[in-house]
Image (cartoon, rainbow, N blue to C red):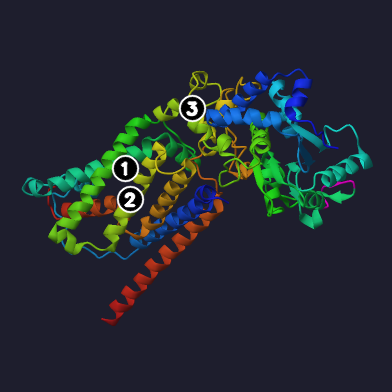
């Protein structure tokens, strides 16, 4: 099933020159902050590598991650990724359906046992045996375990697959969990984001193919090259934060002057992603540049962190009941202790 | 739940609850205590009690001349520290947002650079206060756990807040979480230690003023 020609041969056949491939390697290398010799090695490696068999599993998701990869503004980069890989199974993109589709997945697993990469977007429902999402009569849980058993590595694409995402949000009715909670014995990379940056997906896959190993990962298993710094660290509005100049609403004078959006709930200071540097739609813009604060979508539980428009320094707990009860108890104990003191004094006075 | 979620949510809720409980308990139990009758007759030239209270408070804002020299360092340093704490707490945008979340009111913030400068001075002032407590023989003798722990829970929020604003020493989420936890510690200790003077200073000095006024002492 898998094409035995090298990526370089395939690209040459499609009119993409070696020089173009070197430029692409340099671009990806720069995005991942690789040294220049590694950028060259990346391009050389890509040219000589065979296309990597990839099985793409879509679980509890909105297809936004696939949309991000296939419908971005710069098709040369993101389309090239499909020249680097042999996408043997992808429900949204594959032409076949039904039994033929499932047969394609099983054939890819058989032909590339121990060598294929499993990409997952979407979280995995586990409640009630995982019955809340099934494909071809099998639960997502069964499909993931079956497919991952002979995989080389797994890549969780998007926040749902990486950390549970929106299906995992309170009250999590389907018992949704990230891939990392199901598969614990395979190398795993999380490329979080809702959706993730296309270049982060392309760069990570290219690195994996070229160097045959995982890139440096942070404690949440995200590539450090894309998730090594916070949005805030690289935000062009950062100088306004440092000066204490904050927009008070989305259309006030401060907002028009590009002041910091911290007061409007921006989660940039606690969110690790490459949005301010790589940006979106071919480097045109990113949410903060478009006037909206960062939602923190590449972080775990971003949906349940007290609200998108609640500033980071504000408390998130519901104080009413707790503080009200504490005040009532405080008043009660205060009055009781004073009454006790009065009683003791009166008793002492009578004793005299 | 990560550390920052814990600090912003359950920790702050618990700390504020303990704070409200403790303050209500201590104030009420104090105000409802039976008051000893002052056997001294009220002097004919005594002013109304509230005048005595205000004078008593105002008089104690600065030491009398004979004591000024000896207590100048403590007095000035005390003002520097307290004003610094007030400027940092009420002037930083992030703190105003925190208070807005609690009470629904807000006001214009001061420049972050100015706040950082004031925070450094406040830390220096706190360090000086501790140094004096440790080196002055009498002060050292009468110091208790209450004094040292109160100093610590006051110092920590300023120090960790300065680090958080400057993004120094650790990732910002960790710094912010540690800062919020240090604030929670301060809130929990507040009603039970000498920080309670933030409320009681008005009571004690006014009460002294009223007592003096009744006996004809002009402050």
Tag in front: 2 or 3 = 3
Q: Residue furthest left?
A: B66
What is the spatial separation of the Cα atoms under label 2 and label 3, in whole angstroms? 29 Å
Q: Is residue B191 left or right of residue A169?
A: left
> What subunit carries mark 2?
B
* Magenta span of residues: A131-136
Residue B192 among those drawn in magenta: no
Q: Residue at x 44, y 51 (%)?
A: B181
Dominant SS of magenta comes to loop
Q: Position of residue A214 (x, y in %)?
A: 63, 42
- Residue behind mark 3: A260
Query: Residue at horizontal 35%, vertical 49%?
Result: B156
Secondary structure type for disc 2: helix
Left or right of A294, for residue B50: left
- Are callouts 1 and 2 both on one chain? yes
Taking depth in this image into account, of A297 and A209 the one nearest to the observer is: A209
Q: Is residue B17 left or right of residue A123?
A: left
> Badge 1: how crowded within 10 Å, few (<14), some, or many (20+)?
many
Q: Quadrant of residue A50?
A: top right
Chain assignment, label 3: A
Q: Which mark is residue B85?
A: 1
Q: Residues within 10 Å of mark 2 (few under 14, many from 20)?
A: many
On the question of residue A44 being in view, the answer is yes
Sooner in the amino-acid sequence: mark 1 or mark 2 = 1
Residue under disc 2 on the same chain as residue under disc 3: no
Q: Which label was assigned to residue A39? A: none
Residue B113's spot in the image, x, y percent?
Answer: 34, 31
What residue is rendered at 80% in x and 34% in y? A4
Give the distance between the C-alpha atoms of the residues marked 1 and 3, in whole angstroms.
25 Å
Label pair 1/2, CB-CB below 8 angstroms = yes
């Amino acid at each position: 099933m898998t094409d035995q020609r090298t990526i370089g041969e395939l690209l040459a056949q499609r009119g993409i020159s070696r020089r173009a491939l070197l430029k692409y390697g340099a671009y990806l290398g720069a995005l991942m902050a690789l040294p220049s010799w590694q950028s060259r090695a990346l391009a050389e490696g890509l040219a000589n590598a065979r296309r990597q068999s990839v099985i793409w599993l879509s679980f509890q998701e909105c297809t936004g991650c696939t949309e991000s990869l296939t419908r971005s503004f710069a098709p040369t980069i993101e389309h090239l990724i499909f020249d680097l890989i042999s996408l043997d199974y992808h429900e949204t993109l594959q032409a076949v359906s039904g039994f033929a589709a499932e047969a394609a997945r099983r054939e890819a697993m058989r032909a590339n046992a121990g060598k294929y990469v499993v990409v997952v977007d979407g979280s995995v429902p586990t409640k009630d045996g995982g019955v809340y999402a099934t494909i071809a009569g099998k639960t997502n849980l069964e499909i993931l375990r079956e497919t991952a058993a002979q995989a080389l590595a797994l890549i969780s694409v998007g926040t749902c697959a990486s950390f549970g995402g929106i299906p995992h949000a309170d009250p999590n009715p389907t018992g949704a969990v990230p891939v990392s909670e199901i598969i614990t014995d395979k190398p795993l990379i999380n490329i979080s984001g809702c959706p993730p940056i296309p270049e982060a997906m392309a760069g990570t896959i290219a690195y994996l193919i070229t160097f045959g190993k995982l890139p440096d990962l942070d404690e949440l298993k995200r590539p450090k090259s894309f998730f090594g710094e916070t949005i805030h660290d690289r935000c062009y509005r950062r100088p306004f934060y440092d000066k204490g100049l904050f927009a008070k609403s989305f259309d006030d004078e401060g907002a028009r002057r590009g002041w910091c959006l911290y007061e409007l709930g921006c989660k940039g200071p606690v969110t690790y992603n490459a949005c301010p540097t790589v940006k979106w739609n071919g480097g045109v813009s990113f949410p903060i540049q478009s006037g909206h604060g960062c939602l923190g979508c590449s972080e775990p539980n971003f949906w349940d962190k007290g609200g998108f428009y609640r500033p980071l320094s504000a408390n998130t707990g519901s104080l009413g009941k707790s503080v009200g009860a504490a005040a009532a108890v405080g008043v009660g104990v205060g009055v009781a202790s004073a009454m006790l003191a009065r009683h003791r004094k009166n008793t002492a006075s009578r004793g005299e | 739940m990560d550390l920052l979620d814990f600090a912003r949510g359950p920790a702050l809720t618990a700390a504020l609850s303990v704070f409200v409980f403790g303050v209500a308990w201590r104030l009420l139990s104090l105000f409802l205590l039976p008051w000893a009758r002052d056997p001294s007759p009220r002097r004919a030239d005594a002013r109304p009690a509230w005048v005595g209270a205000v004078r008593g408070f105002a008089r104690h804002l600065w030491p009398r001349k004979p004591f000024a020299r000896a207590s100048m360092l403590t007095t000035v340093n005390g003002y520097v520290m307290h004003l610094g704490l007030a400027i940092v707490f009420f002037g930083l945008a992030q703190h105003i947002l925190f208070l807005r979340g609690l009470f629904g009111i807000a006001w214009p913030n001061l420049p972050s650079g100015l706040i950082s400068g004031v925070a450094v001075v406040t830390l220096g002032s706190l360090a000086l206060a501790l140094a004096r407590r440790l080196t002055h023989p009498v002060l050292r003798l009468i110091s208790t756990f209450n004094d040292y722990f109160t100093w610590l829970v006051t110092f920590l929020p300023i120090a960790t807040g300065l680090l958080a604003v400057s993004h120094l020493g650790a990732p910002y989420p960790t710094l912010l979480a540690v800062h919020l936890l240090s604030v929670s510690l301060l809130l929990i200790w507040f009603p039970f230690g000498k920080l309670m003077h933030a409320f009681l200073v008005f009571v004690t000095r006014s009460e002294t003023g009223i007592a003096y006024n009744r006996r004809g002492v002009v402050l």
